[in-house]
Image (tube, rainbow, N blue to C red):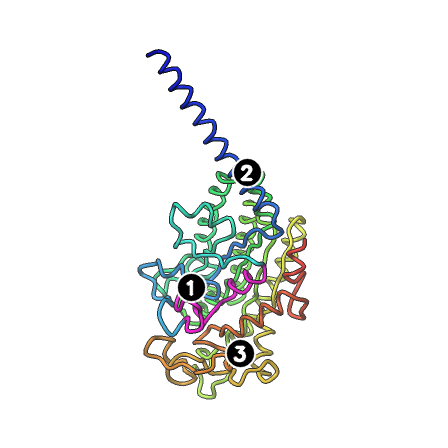
């Protein structure tokens, strides 16, 4: 019996050694695979312009796009994207040869370790730079909470790859931040805020907050950043119908420009303080303004009205299943009240990726090679 026990224990020991070796080799292979890629992953933070479905999992959120006519041109139909098709996150991922980052809240425990190696999106429709921005929509993932979620991912990556490999992996990855419009809209439509703080002080607080977010991400190994400025929000269909002449909301646009200029200055200072970082900034304001002012130049026939909605400029009622939608989405700059069509976004990303008059610091293709 003693010999049988010896052989049994020896068998168990050998099995454990073999299994551990296989497991270690597998992790080592994954570590090498993802660390050696030029851009191994993209991690996305933001609002509805890059939300790929996180809000679908927020029970109280009124800001969702998981129904038609959203996704009418997306391969699988409505997904939670505020678009007729793909959004900014999708097109950047395509340029990088990466899968579109999944919504963080959609990930289940058995799959999360592998999935996050190529990226994930924390973006949430209705979110803003400031924590209170989403309150009127009852629920959204604030930017600070999105960073908390990324911190969870960071810890998982360390467990999966090890500390050194995680730092290498993340230093090569792209961190995309597209969040800004909701804060400024809130200022002009929430009298409780506008009565207690000047617009300049409010814009300054936005810039200060985004700078702190960048520092937090830097402390968690982020080194390559992509940021987009606030677009010409005052010329969106929803803002136009606020006046009889359907003209742009110029005061809103004025403070959008103020914020964008402040953000660019802040990014320059951030780069000088943390000189091992690199960033690419896209002047969405000027690009969209050009689309609106010169639609024929870009192949559009409609630059004021939304494609999907009801009422004046199809902007009195949002894009809902009961709404009308245009038969040719590529004719329109805007998909709904505020969001651009898939074609508009695709053209933006082409500009952003390659050398463009609308890019500050480096374009995306240059950022990839750094």
Image label count: 3
- Choose the circle earlier in sequence order: 1 or 2: 2
Q: Residue 125 got which mark?
A: 1
Q: Which residues are magenta?
A: 71-96
Q: Secondary structure at mark 1?
A: loop
Assess disc 2: are there few (<14), some (14-19) or many (≥20) residues with their C-alpha within 10 Å of its C-alpha.
some
Labelled pair 3, 2 in contact (Cβ < 8 Å) = no
Quadrant where the N terminus is found in the figure:
top left
Label 3, label 2: how far apart the Cα atoms are: 56 Å
Q: Quarter-wise, where is residue 228 in the image? A: bottom right
- Choose the circle earlier in sequence order: 3 or 2: 2
Q: Quarter-wise, where is residue 142 in the image? A: bottom left
Q: Nearer the viewer, residue 114 or 363?
A: 114
* Relative to 341, residue 106 above or below: above
* Any part of residue 202 in sight: no
Closer to viewer: mark 3 or mark 2: 2
Give percent across and percent down for residue 159: 48, 38
Q: Residue at x 43, y 57 (%)?
A: 103
Queried whether the magenta region covers residue 79, the answer comes back as yes
Labelled pair 1, 3 in contact (Cβ < 8 Å) = no
222 relative position to 150: left or right: right
Assess disc 3: are there few (<14), some (14-19) or many (≥20) residues with their C-alpha within 10 Å of its C-alpha.
some
Q: Residue at x 56, y 81 (%)?
A: 292
Q: Residue at x 49, y 67 (%)?
A: 87
* Relative to 279, residue 4 above or below: above
Q: Secondary structure at mark 3?
A: helix
Q: Residue 367 got which mark?
A: none
Query: Pointer 2: what residue?
Result: 28
Give percent across and percent down for residue 265: 64, 60
Query: Pointer 3: what residue?
Result: 250
């Amino acid at each position: 019996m003693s010999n049988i026990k010896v052989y049994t224990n020896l068998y168990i020991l050998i099995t454990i050694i073999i299994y551990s070796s296989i497991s270690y080799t597998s992790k080592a292979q994954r570590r090498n695979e993802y660390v050696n890629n030029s851009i191994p992953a993209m991690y996305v933070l933001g609002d509805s312009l890059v939300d790929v479905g996180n809000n679908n999992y927020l029970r109280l959120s009124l800001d969702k796009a998981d129904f038609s006519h959203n996704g009418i041109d997306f391969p699988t139909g409505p997904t939670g994207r505020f678009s007729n098709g793909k959004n900014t996150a999708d097109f950047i991922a395509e340029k990088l040869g990466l899968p579109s980052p999944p919504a963080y809240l959609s990930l289940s425990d058995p799959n999360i370790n592998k999935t996050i190696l190529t990226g994930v999106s924390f973006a949430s429709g209705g979110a803003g730079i400031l924590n209170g921005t989403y309150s009127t929509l009852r629920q959204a993932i604030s930017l600070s909470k999105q960073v908390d979620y990324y911190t969870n991912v960071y810890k998982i990556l360390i467990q999966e790859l090890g500390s050194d490999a995680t730092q290498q992996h993340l230093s090569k990855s792209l961190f995309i931040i597209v969040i800004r419009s909701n804060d400024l809209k809130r200022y002009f439509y929430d009298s409780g805020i506008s009565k207690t703080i000047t617009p300049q002080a409010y814009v300054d607080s936005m810039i200060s907050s985004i700078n702190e977010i960048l520092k937090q991400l830097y402390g968690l190994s982020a080194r390559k950043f992509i940021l987009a400025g606030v677009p010409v929000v005052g010329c969106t269909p929803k803002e136009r119908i606020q006046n009889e002449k359907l003209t742009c909301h110029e005061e809103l646009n004025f403070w959008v420009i103020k914020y964008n200029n402040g953000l660019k200055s802040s990014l320059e200072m951030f780069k000088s303080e943390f000189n091992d970082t690199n960033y690419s900034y896209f002047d969405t304001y000027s690009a969209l303004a050009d689309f609106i002012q010169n639609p024929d130049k870009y192949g559009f026939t409609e630059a004021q009205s939304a494609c999907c909605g009801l009422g004046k400029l199809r902007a009195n009622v949002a894009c809902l299943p009961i709404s009308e939608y245009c038969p040719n989405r590529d004719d329109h700059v805007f998909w709904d009240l505020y969001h651009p069509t898939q074609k508009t976004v695709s053209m933006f990303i082409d500009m952003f990726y390659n050398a463009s008059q609308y890019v500050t610091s480096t374009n995306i293709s240059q950022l990839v090679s750094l």
